[in-house]
Image: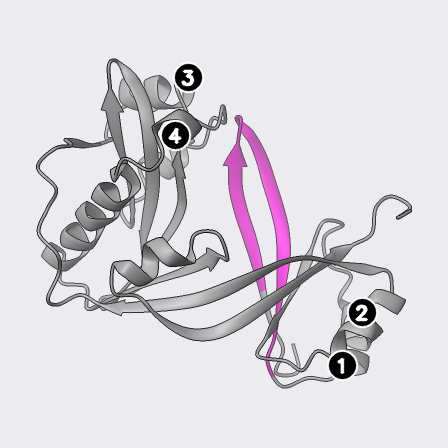
Amino acid sequence: LDGLTILRVDDVWNQEPHVADEVIVQNHSPAAVLAMLASYQPTADHRITLVDRPASDHVAYNAAGYRHSSNEVLLVRKLSDLPPLDQRYSVGQAKTIAEMQWLNSNDPANRAWISETRLHESGLRHSFIALEQRVVARVRACRIDAEHSYVMNLYTASDYRRRGIARALMIHVLHEAATHGEQWSVLVASEAGLPLYQALGYEQRASLVVFEPVTEPID
């Protein structure tokens, strides 16, 4: 839209469809972005993601009814010189309806995160680690194109963290992407998750600041 990138994210959580717009801002002023959004009419729960924009932009978005919700980092890693697979943990992948249902019922974040439509999408890979008949970590990887894979939805059960489980799962994801001929792995990390990904060889490409509409009065 006039050089402004708007992504419509269509996903399913807890078997409920969720559609939301994400506005990616790189070179536009707040005034230009807000004017374009007024004519575009995005989804109610849209978000504005500022990519390497100056902090002075924040005041304008706050004044227009948005709140700062998070800071994130865009990371990339070339799929070469990968660390060896961690043999302590076996990684599974959901491929059948029964596996999807079991994963959704035992999700460590208590969210039904795979729909039947997503299960059968050829570009998506849903991987997990289970211990003692329990899903302790899961992640989704999406083949963007022939050279790029996007990693999302990594989550580890709180009582299984700091055991190298998330690292083992990510290393598996990287090796699998490489076997599919992909050359680069891309992801967006929270500040809390940044040390894990940097230790795996990801490098920062951009700083992201996210704003969302204010839905309740702020004290």
Decide which of 185, 166 is in the foreground and name it.
166
The residue pinned by badge 4 equals 116
| Image position of 81 with respect to 150: above or below | below
The residue pinned by badge 1 equals 56
Mark 4 touches mark 2? (CB < 8 Å): no
Asked which secondary structure carries label 4, the reply is helix
| Image position of 79 with respect to 109: above or below | below
Tag 4: amino acid: Glu
**Which badge, 3 or 2, is on the more N-terminal residue?**
2
Asked which secondary structure carries label 1, the reply is loop
Residue, x 76% and y 72% (percent of image)? 58
Choose mark 3 or mark 1, whichever is in front: 1
Crowd class of label 4 (few under 14; some 14 to 19; many from 20; radius 10 Å): few
Residue, x 67% and y 58% (percent of image)? 47
Q: How far apart are marks 3 and 2 (CA)?
A: 39 Å
**Which badge, 3 or 1, is on the more N-terminal residue?**
1
Asked which secondary structure carries label 3, the reply is helix
Image coordinates for residue 123, horizontal then vertical, percent: 29, 50
Tag 3: amino acid: Ser
Mark yes or no: residue 137 visible.
Answer: yes
Tag 2: amino acid: Tyr
The residue pinned by badge 2 equals 61
Choose mark 1 or mark 2, whichever is in front: 1
Locate residue 34: give its quadrant: bottom right
Image coordinates for residue 113, horizontal then vertical, percent: 45, 32
Q: Give the range drawn in magenta.
A: 7-26
**Which badge, 1 or 2, is on the more N-terminal residue?**
1
Tag 1: amino acid: Ser
> Is residue 24 toward the left or the right of residue 219 in the image?
left
Q: Distance between the residues labelled 1 and 2?
A: 10 Å
